[in-house]
Image (tube, grey):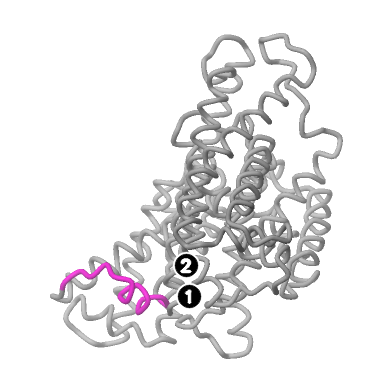
Amino acid sequence: MKPAIRGAVAGFVGGLVFGASMAFYGMLPTVASIVRTGSPVVGFLVHMVFAVVIGAGFGVLADRHRQIVSWGLLYGAFWWFLGPLTLLPLFQGGAVTWTLSAAQALLPSLIGHLSYGMTVALAYLLLRGERPSSWPRPAMLARGLVAGALAGGLSLHGLGFLLGAAAGILYPLVFPAPESSGPALVRGSSYGFMWWVFFRLTGEPLLHGELDWAHPPVDQFPGYLLLGALTAVLYTWLGTLSRGLFVDDVRMFPVEAPGTRAFRAIRSGAVAGLVGGTLFTAVMVAVGVLPTVARMVGSTNAVVGLIVHLIIAQLIGVSYAVLFRRKSFDFVSGIGWGLCYGFFWWVLGDLTLLPLFTGSSVRWDAGALASGLPSLVGHLAYGAALGAVYFRLEARTNPWWMTRSEAETARVEARRDQTLGSAPALWALTVFVALTVPVLIFA
């Protein structure tokens, strides 16, 4: 079956799922207005035509990629922006308004488009017919079960072992390709976002007959992101117990003392973290949060808060170096991984650990997320600077994308694999999720 045909079939399946939600919300007459009628039946037919055509486009674009679920989420988000937010007002004879209020009014449509994108991607995976040898083995499913159950137990707000176990079992089915800890963490965050949309916003409310996409439960949004990230990281660690985080690749062409590359990576990570932390300081000073950071060590002095902040920035930079060593091949990929890591630390650090370390309770409600928006901007800036500077420092001593030996050739191939994987989609999807936070909390 050709990619376009597979995509069209997958688009038909996704269109049925999305169409059912549109009928529930009474949005089909709006779609019918494109052809100058208000009939829900005509609206459903028009919707299905669009769903099939858009699905065919997904098949053409995503066929070469292996991990396409993240691409499906991003594809659904793109068509929400292009369709209801841009083209539909033009077809109705109105004006395009890219405002926060317009996006909030179309929040149910956004969640519907994300569900459509995920459904299309999952259906496309089934239609593509993966070889049995590439299917997850029982040991991988068992590893996912353990990792997910642990992640569910460690997550706050009572997500629970059962939900985590379900997420863990499905994880190797959705993402069968192995990955190192850093990219796995980012991919897991997108996996958690998928669970929040599919299960918490859609599946669970439908079981109770209470589907309400206009008022999503944002208080569990960070928890699901952490659940997915923990599941992915624990799954990766359980599969690599025999390997240490600082084991050097013996195929590298330079001959160096054991651990040299690891300590160089730590040094570069600390420097990159300091640069990103300095950039982040401007945001912290503007919102006056340094005294709050100082409370972590029993003080309220802004200077003490600045010192603590810069130390934490360096420690996070070191962890970035450990998790993402030799994962960036240019400034774009460096900034991409860094942005994702900065967003993750906004959820784990600012929303979760900072309240715990300062003696406050963890709050993930809309008010807490709203007060954390300046910090979100700072974390994204920190992550972008961290990734870019670390790439530059690593490139000076380890330009592994330059083919100079068999090992270097393998790294060029690894870069190609990363491009054909979900890395670019993960970077863009993380930025989109970050931009969507204001839409969610002010809905």
Q: In the image, what residue occupies the spot 72% across and 56% down?
A: 230
Q: Amino acid at mark 2?
A: Val
Residue 202: percent from the left, percent from the top? 56, 77
Closest to the observer, 179 or 370: 370
Farthest residue in the left direction?
Answer: 93
Q: How many marks?
A: 2
- Which span of residues is magenta-colored? 95-108
Classify 292 as above or below 94.
above
Q: Which picture quadrant has residue 29?
A: bottom left
Residue 210: percent from the left, percent from the top? 56, 89
Farthest residue in the bottom direction?
Answer: 209
Q: CA distance from mark 2 to mark 1?
A: 6 Å
Q: Are marks 2 and 1 in contact (CB under 8 Å)?
A: yes
Q: Which picture quadrant has residue 364?
A: bottom right
Q: Return the residue at label 2.
A: 437
Is 101 on the left or on the right of 73, as rendered? Answer: left
Q: Is any atom of residue 13 visible in this view?
A: no
Q: Return the residue at label 1.
A: 441
Q: In the image, what residue occupies the spot 55% across and 50% down?
A: 342
Q: Amino acid at mark 1?
A: Ile
Q: Which picture quadrant has residue 320?
A: top right
Residue 65: percent from the left, percent from the top? 50, 42
